[in-house]
Amino acid sequence: MKIETIPLSLSNAFLVRDKKTILVDCGCCGDWSYLAQFLGRSGVQIRSLSAVVLTHAHFDHCGCASFLQAEGVPVIASEQAQPFLSEGRQEDASAILKLAGAFPFVKRMMNQAVQTEFQPVRIDYPVADSLDLSEFGVEGEVIVTGGHTAASVCVLMENRSVCVGDLLMGGMLGLPPAWKPNFHPLNIDNKKALGQIIELRSAGYERFLVGHGDVLSARSVDAWINRKSRSV
């Protein structure tokens, strides 16, 4: 199994190659040209992707999903995300605005983000609790975690890597130090997010692939867990 980070305009996507190849998240609508070029340079034909997994219904993670689906790529996401994805609107938009009020330096960006629409997309494989990815040619599974949004999912892989979307991030929205774990400032439930990260570490996951920032090591995540367990 090989995992490549795709650095997009506002977030990371991940190309997971195993027996087949899947994409985890797909950036903003405006990232489509770069994403298609990246895949081409990596020797991946878009139609050969066996699926795209959307970790949650925010515009910077699902913006290119409709373009991928139009090319025949099936979409996997939490079944709770369907009302938002099918209408092209942000998940938990009111919660985003409320929480953004505590962070004045990102408030303008968050207001714009909530108003940003993306092309509607249907979920081909809705996930209620978990979904085995072996039928898509990848040894792993998708699990519904909540924490960042109600419909957030993580992608667990046999090589002890886990794509956590925005359940956790590096730095402050990817700014230095991008290797240092942090709660995402727009998590709807930090306590639940922390509990999910603890469970993932207890299950032996060692590399945390985040939507913003660098890949986080087990050592850095453990140190963060120790600090946050005393304060959350």
Image: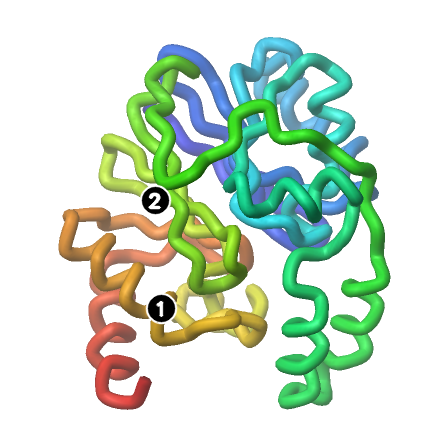
Residue 94: x %, y % from top left: 70, 72
Say which mark, if any, is on residue 8. Answer: none
3D distance between C-alphas at marks 2 and 1? 17 Å
Looking at this view, is 31 or 72 the one in front? 72
Which element is circle 2 on? strand
Circle 1 residue: 192
Q: Residue at x 24, y 33 (%)?
A: 159
Residue at the spot x=70%, y=42% of the render?
A: 85
Label 1 is placed on what type of residue?
Lys
Q: Is residue 95 left or right of residue 184?
A: right
Q: Could you tell me which residue is drawn at 79 percent across and 45 percent down?
A: 88
Q: Position of residue 125 (x, y in %)?
A: 52, 25
Q: Secondary structure at mark 1?
A: helix
Q: Residues within 10 Å of mark 1 (few under 14, many from 20)?
A: some
Say which mark, if any, is on residue 162.
2
Question: What is the x, y in percent for residue 195?
Answer: 28, 66
Which comes sooner in the sequence, label 2 or label 1?
2
